[in-house]
Image (tube, rainbow, N blue to C red):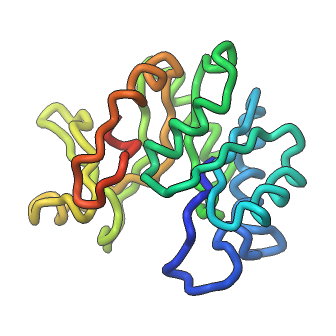
Amino acid sequence: MLAAGGGTRMKSKTMKVLHPIAGRSMIGHVLHAASALEPTRIVAVVGNQREQVGPHIEALVPGVVLAVQETQDGTGHAVRIAWEALPADARTGTVIVAYGDTPLLQGESLQAFADFHRASADAVSILTGVVAKPHGYGRIVRGADGGVEAIVEQKDATPEQAAIAEINSGILAFDADFLDAALPRLGNQNANGEYYLTDT
């Protein structure tokens, strides 16, 4: 669960993931959806305002592992910090990455996605969507066979890629062995100078 970002676009003194929506915090909705998976462990990456965010998450999910991202160097960096917070013998099975600021995520959708990933036997699965206004989202670039070739972030997209309507929701599923091998290989040669999880 990635919850380290500052949420600066909201221009609020309250951390974005702590904003209440329909009786729960944003991250509370996401954690509720994640509970449908009956996960062995939940690792939450905190950073900005961690003094408020960390205890809030711990109150919602007893036994959660908190990992601290001191500098926001991208989603790949955040997941690497989460991964390193786990003992080596816990780095197995299917790993689902979700974001604390996606309160509309439903447990049924997340369960269907996890089931799809396991049945596919692919190393990585991406929950995508087609939207009318894709500006700001990573675009899904597919090859002639329909397979995903890349996820290109808005700032890195060519005009042709920016016209693609299929976007990355940010929800990803990984085979643990693949993720373990991929995280150390991530680079930050992009417009933001960040480590993108989507480069795995």
**Coordinates of residue 2 in the picture (x, y in percent):** 59, 51
99 lies left or right of 90: left
Q: Is 182 placed above or below 146 here? A: above
Q: Is 185 placed above or below 14 here? A: above
Judge whether residue 166 can be spotted in this image: no
Q: Is 56 placed above or below 87 here? A: below
Q: Is 182 placed above or below 61 here? A: above
Q: How many marks?
A: 0
Determine which quarter of the picture holds residue 111.
Answer: top right
Question: Which residue shows up at 46% across the image and 49% down it?
Answer: 75
Q: Residue furthest top?
A: 89
Question: Which residue shows up at 56% across the image and 39% down it?
Answer: 81
**In-front residue for pair 167/63:** 63
Q: Residue furthest front?
A: 70
**Coordinates of residue 41 in the picture (x, y in percent):** 75, 31
Question: Which residue shows up at 80% across the image and 40% down it?
Answer: 64
**In-front residue for pair 168/154:** 154
Quadrant where the C terminus is found in the figure: top left
Question: Which residue shows up at 69% across the image and 39% down it?
Answer: 43
134 lies left or right of 123: left
**Coordinates of residue 126 in the picture (x, y in percent):** 42, 40
Judge whether residue 22 can be spotted in this image: yes
**Coordinates of residue 70 in the picture (x, y in percent):** 58, 54
